Image (spheres, helix red, strand yellow):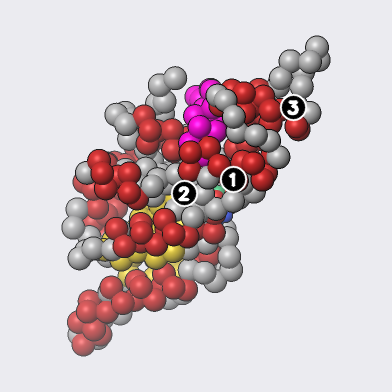
Amino acid sequence: MLIQWFPGHMTKAIRNMEEDIRVVDVVIYVLDARAPYSCVNPEFARVIGNKPIIYVLNKSDLADDEQTKLWQKYFTTENSLCVLLNSTQTNSSKVLLSKIEFLLKGKKEKYDKKGVKMVDRAMVLGVPNSGKSTLINNFSGKYKAITGDKPGVTKGKQWVRIGGVFELLDTPGTLWPSFENQEIAKNLAFIGSIREEVLDIPGLSLDFIEKVKKLYPQFLIDRYNISLDGEPIEILERICESRKFLLRGGDYDYDRGSRAIFDDFRKGRLGKITLDRFSDYKIKE
Ligand SMILES: Nc1nc2c(ncn2[C@@H]2O[C@H](COP(=O)(O)OP(=O)(O)OP(=O)(O)O)[C@@H](O)[C@H]2O)c(=O)[nH]1
Ligand SMILES: [Mg+2]
């Protein structure tokens, strides 16, 4: 199964971002902490240019804390800061706000001296479903961006004013035209950044089982009370059996079983999982 998803609205979204970046002071780059490296969109480098970046390892409540720490270091560079966030938690964006203020302090002082009241503008970007709109809602009591546990929820851009002197731009989640690295594509599919309709969910669940069996075997054992012997398909069958996901006639309901696994993963019921291992990428680099 070759994973591919780059609908027309994403091309348009990237074009819009290239325009809007001109009036932006800082970029808030939202990464899913469960697969932060896979969330780095090669198209964004061109969009961002040399604007300062605050990377947000969002959904860190669902990710492996040890890996998150390593990734936080990786994403902290001369031109970028990196913060951990759970955007569903009330007021968690405060830490982000203080970082933005820190980054823009010099500029603000300059304008204050001239007596100009300036508006800080930040563009929020990231792959679909990484939590951009949720993060913006966290900042703003009033604006309620539509969010959802599927990719492609935000379709158009939207400026949101926070307090008197701060504006955030919500953008539609975007991917890139072709995934040369299908491991990365799979990770994006696992975390829900790729539209389900273009995926073979049972097939994908076998790859997921294989990966989690390697990285966090005990999580599967604890959640489903099964042995992990044999091939991923046998493990999926055991999960179907233990959950009574059987079709009439007694065949395994692979579709239901695989959806249940992804649902467990996405809601954090398997445990805190990070699919991008920092050490793996260091070796590849
Ligand atoms: N556990 C957890 N869930 C989150 C977090 N941030 C967002 N979510 C959930 O992730 C899902 C996607 O959130 P959205 O804010 O719609 O994501 P988005 O990046 O705007 O998605 P698109 O508009 O499709 O690009 C929703 O179900 C949110 O509740 C987080 O920090 N932790
Ligand atoms: Mg959105």
Secondary structure character of the magenta stretch overall? helix
Left or right of 282 on screen, residue 187: right
Q: Which residues are magenta?
A: 195-212
Q: Nearer the viewer, mark 1 or mark 3?
A: 1
Disc 2 within 8 angstroms of ligand 1 (CB): no
Indicate which disc residue 241 carries. 3
Determine the secondary structure under disc 1: helix
Cα distance between the residues tagged 1 and 2: 14 Å
* Vertical order, 249 against 19 (above or below): above
Marks 1 & 2, CB-CB < 8 Å contact: no
* Vertical order, 284 against 99 (above or below): above
Q: Nearer the viewer, mark 3 or mark 2?
A: 3
* Mark positioned earlier in the residue sequence (3 or 2): 3
Residue 282 x, y percent position in the rendering: 26, 48
Nearest the camera: 164 or 55?
Answer: 55
Left or right of 179 on screen, residue 152: right
Cα distance between the residues tagged 1 and 3: 19 Å
Nearest the camera: 134 or 146?
Answer: 134
* Vertical order, 136 against 202 (above or below): below
Determine the secondary structure under disc 3: helix
The picture quadrant where one finds residue 223 is: top right
Residue to which mark 1 is pinned? 218
Residue to which mark 2 is pinned? 274
Question: Hey, which residue is sitting farthest top in the picture?
Answer: 249
Q: Residue at x 55, y 42 (%)?
A: 217
The quadrant of the rendering that contains the N terminus is: top left
